[in-house]
Amino acid sequence: MFNLIRRDVILQKRLLLTFIPFIAFFIIMDAHPALTFLVASIFMPINAFAYDEKAETNILLNSLPYTRKEVIASRYLGAIVYMVSAIGVTSLAFFVFNKPFAITDIAIASGLFLVFSALTFPLFYIFKRGYVSPVVLFSFLFLALIRKPVVSFISEHLTVINNFVASLSITTLYAGAAVVIMTFYAVSWGITTIIYQRKVF
């Protein structure tokens, strides 16, 4: 399974040369640190899926001595490995550019990345190749644009939820969010495994 994760890194080695300039652009433009960490985390997993869509990689993977469960596990575990690596490199970039960020920014970005991955990964095995990557990228940009209006709407109209969240301690809030997100990620992992096992290539 480790070799499958390593394979994605090797295939993207040229693309990885653009990773630092890509992240540096966000930092220089004073994008919110959480958004920068999120974009950095998404970079490799989505590019790996985009490459597989173009190259019909699933046919090759199914000819290798790996079970379909292992193929999907490499995707979900690989995403976490890429996220941790991206956060490490991005943190170093923030230090180099002398830009402040908080642990909260990393926590928020990590949670959003796992939710985003849980929602999008199954789509790559449901829809036809070539269609998912543009839709996923457009959806991500769209959600980033409407983030402020949505937060404002929730703050103004859903006071019960706001009051409940405000009554929780920071520790309880983060622990609860972590449990919910990891459960959601695990459920997505299971669903994608079932879809992939039944898919015909």
Image (spheres, rainbow, N blue to C red):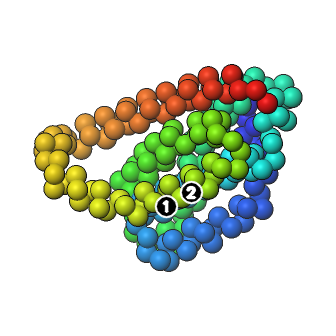
Question: Marks 1 and 2: CB-CB under 8 Å?
Answer: yes
Q: Which is nearer the eye, 55 or 42?
A: 55
Q: Residue furthest bottom?
A: 28
Residue 175, x across and y down, in percent: 32, 36
Q: Secondary structure at mark 2?
A: helix
Q: Is residue 72 above or below residue 133?
A: above
53 on left or right of 23: right
Residue 35, x across and y down, in percent: 44, 61
Q: Quadrant of the N terminus?
A: top right
Q: Which is nearer the eye, 75 or 156?
A: 156
Residue linked to disc 2: 137
Label 2 is placed on what type of residue? Leu
- Mark 1 Cα within 10 Å, few/some/many (few <14, many 20+)? few
* Identity of the residue drawn at 24% across and 44% down: 170
Q: Which is nearer the eye, 116 or 139?
A: 139
177 on left or right of 92: left
Residue linked to disc 1: 141
* Identity of the residue drawn at 76% across and 26% down: 200
* Identity of the residue drawn at 49% across and 68% down: 94
Q: Secondary structure at mark 1?
A: helix
Residue 137, x across and y down, in percent: 56, 57
Query: What is the distance, in whole Å, between disc 1 and disc 2 at their CAs?
Result: 6 Å
Label 1 is placed on what type of residue? Leu
Q: Which mark is residue 24?
A: none
Residue 7, x across and y down, in percent: 78, 43
Q: Is residue 73 above or below residue 101?
A: above
